[in-house]
Image: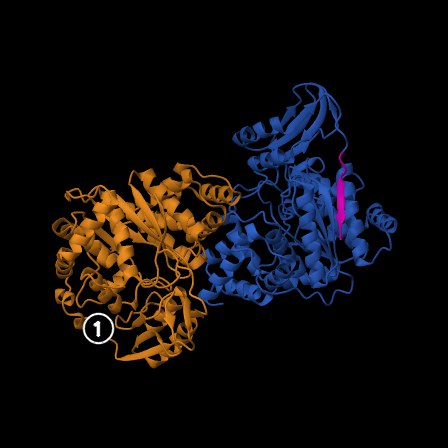
Chain colours: A blue, B orange
C-alpha cells in the first residue's frame, strides 16, 4: 500500500465507507512490515472505532492479523483441540481448574493465556505463583507438552500474530481499546492461530468486566462467534456475571489455591458452576459428549476420580513447577500481614463492586499499574461476603493479605466503598446470563 | 501532559465530550515540544474530525497554535494593518492586484501567502514567476519592507506558528484535512500571528473549492469570524463562486500578467469585481473608508492614478524582483508551445469545472503533484469561454501553454471534459454569494 493509498483508505473509513478484503489485508501486512507508520494506523483505528467494521471487513482484517506471523501446527495431536478464552474479570481463575478437567476427558487443551490487564487478573500471573512454573515456552516445547499430556498452560508465543502485539500497543496509547470489532479481531486472531477444532468464550458482563452491559457483551460474543464461523472453527460463547468478583479469592497465589480446591471437589459454588458450564461447552464442541448431562457427568468423574488433579500436576512438572503444591498449599507464597474489612452496619449485601475490588488488588501489588511492574504473587483479597449474604455490624467482608502498609492504605478506600448494604435481600442474579453460538 | 493524560483526553473527545481550555493548551504545547507523539495526535485529530470542537474548545486550541512560536510585532507601523486570506481556488490571483490597491489607500498589508495545494494555485508560486522575486524573507526584512512601503508579499515565516506546520503535515498524511475546526484553526492561527487590526476572508464555494457547497463554506466562514472575535480582531468574510475558474488565466506567469492587467485598469470583469469587493471590506475593516461607495471610489482612484501599480513595482524591487515587468510582460517566462481546446458542438457554456481545469494545470507543471516538485512558471491555461458564453462548433474553449507534450497529453482529457455545453443559456450565478461578519 503506497502512502497515498492508505490515506484514501483512512478517508473512506472516516466517511463511513467500506474497505475491500484486499485493502484490509494490505493494510495489516504493510503495518506489520513497518511501511504504514503508527500515526496513519492510529488515525485508521480511531475511524474504525467510531465508524465500525461490517462483517465483510472484520473477517479479512482478522485473517490478515492471524497470518501476520507463525500459525501453530498441532497436526500430530489426535484428540480434538479446544481452548477457552475469557474477556477478563476479577477473581476469574476458571482457566486453571477448567483446562485439566477438560483434558482429563480426552480433549486436547493447548491453552494460551494472558497477564493481568487494568483491574483484571491474568492466568499467567496466577500460574507463576507456583514455584518454578514457566509460562514462556518455545513453540517446539509447547507442542511437545500438548502432544504428550493433552494440556499445556502457556503465554502467547512471540512468533504468533505479531500484528496483534503491535496493534494492541498502539490502541492502548491512542484511546482505541474498547471497540467491539477491534477487541474481537484481537482475541480471535490469536485463538485461531492455535490450530483449534473449537473454541469456547466466556464473555464477562458487569462492573468488573470490560463490557459493562449485557447488550454490548452479547454483541461482542456474536461478533466473535461469526469470526469463528468465517474461519470454519466452531465457537460457543457464554455471557457470565462479573458484577461481583468470581469466587472468594482475588490475587494470584490465593486464586491458584482456590483453583486447586475446585479440582479437589471443593471451592466456591460460583467458580465450580462457571467451570462446569464452560467445560460442558468445551466437551460438546469437541464432540466428546453427546449432550449436557453426559458432559457434566464426564467432568464430575474427571474431578472426583482425581484424574484432573493428576493431569494438572503432570503439566506443572512438565513446565518446571513444583508439583507438590497440589497436595501442600503452604508451598505457595504467603503475604506476611493480614487486615480485615468489616461491615459498618447490619444488612444484606446488595453489591460487591468487582471493579473496585480489582483495582484494590492491583494497588496491593497483585497486578500492574505499569507494564514493567512486577507482580507480588502473595498479596490479595479474600471476599468473605457476596451478594445476598446477610451481615451484622462488624461482620468481616474481606480479608486482605498484604506486604506493604502503604499499599494497603491505598487499597482500603476502594474496599471500604466496594460493598453496598441494603435493608432488603437483593433479587438473585443468574451466574450465566446467556449463550451465543 | 503525561502519557496517561493524553489518552484520557483522546477518549473524552472520541466519546463526544469537551476538553477544557487548559487541556487544549497543554496538548498543543506538548505536541509542539515533541512529548506527545504523532500517533496520539493522529488519533485525537481523527476524533476531532468526527466529533468536532465547540467554540469554547476552538478558541483556546487556536490561541495555543498561535503562541507555539514567534508572533509578529508590527508596532512601528502606524497605519491600520489588514490582510486577506483566500481558502484557495483555480485562477484566484486576486491577492496580487488587491494588496497594492489597498496599500495605496493607506492601509498596511503585511501579506503572508501560501503555495499551490492540490488542484489550487498559490500566490507565492505566481509571484515567483517575476524574475528575481524573493518570497522567503527573514522577519526583520519582512517588517522593514512593510514599515517602508505599507506592503509586503511573502511566505509564512518558519518561526511563526510551528504547531500549524506540524499539524498540517500530520493531517495531510492521516485523512484529517477537510474538517471545519481544523481548517479554521490552521488559517486563523497563522493570520492572527501577523499582528493585524483586521482580516478579510475570501471563502470559495463550488467545484474548484475545498468547500463544495455554500452551507459548509458559510459554516467555515462563521467559525473563522468567531475565532477573530474571540481574539479581538475584526474579521469579515465573503463567500465567492469557485465553480468555474476566476478570470481567464490559470497558471503562474499568465496569472501574474492578468494581475498586472487589473492594476492597469484592464483584466477580466470577474477578477476586477472580486478584487474590488474584497478591497472594499479591507478598507472598511481598516476604518479608512466610511462606507462601501467611498471604499470603491478610493480603490478606483488608487488604480486609475497609477499609485497601486507604483506600489507593487516598488515592492517587487524591494523583494529582489525585476520591476520592469509592470510595463513589459515579455519579461515574464513564456512556454514554447500552445494548443487549443475547441468546442465539439454549438451551445451555451453551462459549466467550466474549476477542479478539472486546476488538475489539468497541475499536470502541465503549473502546480505540484508532490511537495518536492518544482513548478514551471511558464505553463498554464487561458480559459476562453466561461459560463453563459455562446459557442459554435470549433470555437476555442481554452488555450494551453505547455512545454512537455507528455504533460499536455495528461492534461487534455480533463480539459476535454471540463466544459459542459447546453442548448439553453444557464441562469446567472452571483460572483459573491454572501457575506459573514
A144 shown above or below B330: above
Place of residue A4 in the rendered image (x, y in percent of width and height, measured from the top left): 45, 65
- Left or right: B122, with A27 as reference point: left
Residue sitting at x 23%, y 53%: B111
Q: Where is the N terminus of chain B found, in terms of image quarters?
A: top left
Residue placed most toward the observer, B324 or A381 = B324
Label 1 crowd bin: few (<14), some (14–19), many (20+), radius 10 Å: some
Is residue B192 shown above or below A194? above
* Chain part drawn in magenta: A429-437
Q: Which residue is drawn at 24% across and 65% down?
A: B258
Vertical comparison of A319 with A380: above or below: below
> Is residue B365 visible in the rendered structure shown here?
yes
Q: Mark 1 lies on which chain?
A: B
Q: Name the residue under label 1.
A: B333
Element type at marker 1?
A: loop
Towards the viewer: A147 or B417: B417
Amino acid at each position: 500500500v503506497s502512502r497515498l493509498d492508505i490515506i484514501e483508505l483512512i478517508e473512506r473509513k472516516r466517511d463511513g465507507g467500506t474497505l475491500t478484503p484486499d485493502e484490509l489485508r494490505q493494510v495489516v501486512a504493510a503495518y506489520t512490515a513497518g511501511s504504514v507508520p503508527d500515526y496513519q494506523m492510529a488515525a485508521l483505528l480511531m475511524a474504525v472505532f467510531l465508524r465500525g467494521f461490517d462483517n465483510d471487513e472484520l473477517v479479512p482484517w482478522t485473517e490478515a492479523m492471524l497470518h501476520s506471523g507463525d500459525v501453530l501446527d498441532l497436526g500430530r495431536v489426535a484428540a480434538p483441540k479446544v481452548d477457552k478464552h475469557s474477556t477478563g474479570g476479577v477473581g476469574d481463575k476458571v482457566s486453571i481448574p477448567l483446562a485439566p478437567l477438560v483434558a482429563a476427558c480426552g480433549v486436547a487443551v493447548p491453552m494460551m493465556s494472558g497477564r493481568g490487564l487494568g483491574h483484571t487478573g491474568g492466568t499467567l500471573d496466577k500460574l507463576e505463583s507456583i514455584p518454578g512454573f514457566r509460562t514462556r515456552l518455545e513453540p517446539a516445547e509447547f507442542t511437545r507438552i500438548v502432544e504428550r499430556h493433552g494440556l499445556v498452560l502457556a503465554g502467547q508465543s512471540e512468533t504468533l500474530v505479531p500484528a496483534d502485539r503491535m496493534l494492541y500497543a498502539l490502541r492502548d496509547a491512542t484511546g482505541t481499546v474498547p471497540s467491539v470489532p477491534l477487541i474481537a479481531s484481537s482475541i480471535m486472531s490469536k485463538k485461531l492461530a492455535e490450530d483449534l477444532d473449537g473454541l469456547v468464550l466466556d464473555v464477562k458482563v458487569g462492573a468488573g468486566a470490560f463490557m459493562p452491559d449485557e447488550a454490548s457483551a452479547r454483541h461482542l460474543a456474536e461478533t466473535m462467534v461469526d469470526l469463528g464461523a468465517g474461519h470454519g472453527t466452531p465457537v460457543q460463547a457464554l455471557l457470565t456475571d462479573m458484577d461481583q468478583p468470581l469466587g472468594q479469592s482475588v490475587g494470584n497465589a490465593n486464586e491458584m489455591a482456590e483453583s486447586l480446591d475446585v479440582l479437589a471437589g471443593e471451592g466456591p459454588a460460583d467458580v465450580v458452576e462457571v467451570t462446569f458450564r464452560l467445560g460442558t461447552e468445551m466437551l460438546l464442541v469437541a464432540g466428546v459428549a453427546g449432550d449436557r448431562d453426559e458432559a457434566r457427568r464426564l467432568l464430575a468423574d474427571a474431578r472426583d476420580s482425581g484424574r484432573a488433579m493428576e493431569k494438572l500436576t503432570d503439566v506443572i512438572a512438565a513446565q518446571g513447577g513444583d508439583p507438590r503444591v497440589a497436595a501442600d498449599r503452604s508451598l505457595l507464597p504467603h503475604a506476611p500481614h493480614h487486615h480485615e474489612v468489616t461491615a459498618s452496619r447490619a444488612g444484606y449485601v446488595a453489591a460487591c463492586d468487582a471493579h473496585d475490588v480489582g483495582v484494590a488488588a492491583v494497588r496491593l501489588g497483585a497486578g500492574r499499574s505499569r507494564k514493567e511492574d512486577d507482580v507480588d504473587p502473595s498479596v490479595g483479597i479474600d471476599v468473605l461476603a457476596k451478594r445476598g449474604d446477610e451481615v451484622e455490624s462488624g461482620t468481616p467482608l474481606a480479608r486482605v493479605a498484604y506486604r506493604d502498609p502503604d499499599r494497603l492504605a491505598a487499597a482500603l478506600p476502594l474496599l471500604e466503598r466496594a460493598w453496598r448494604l441494603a435493608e432488603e435481600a437483593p433479587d438473585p442474579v443468574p451466574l450465566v446470563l446467556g449463550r451465543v453460538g
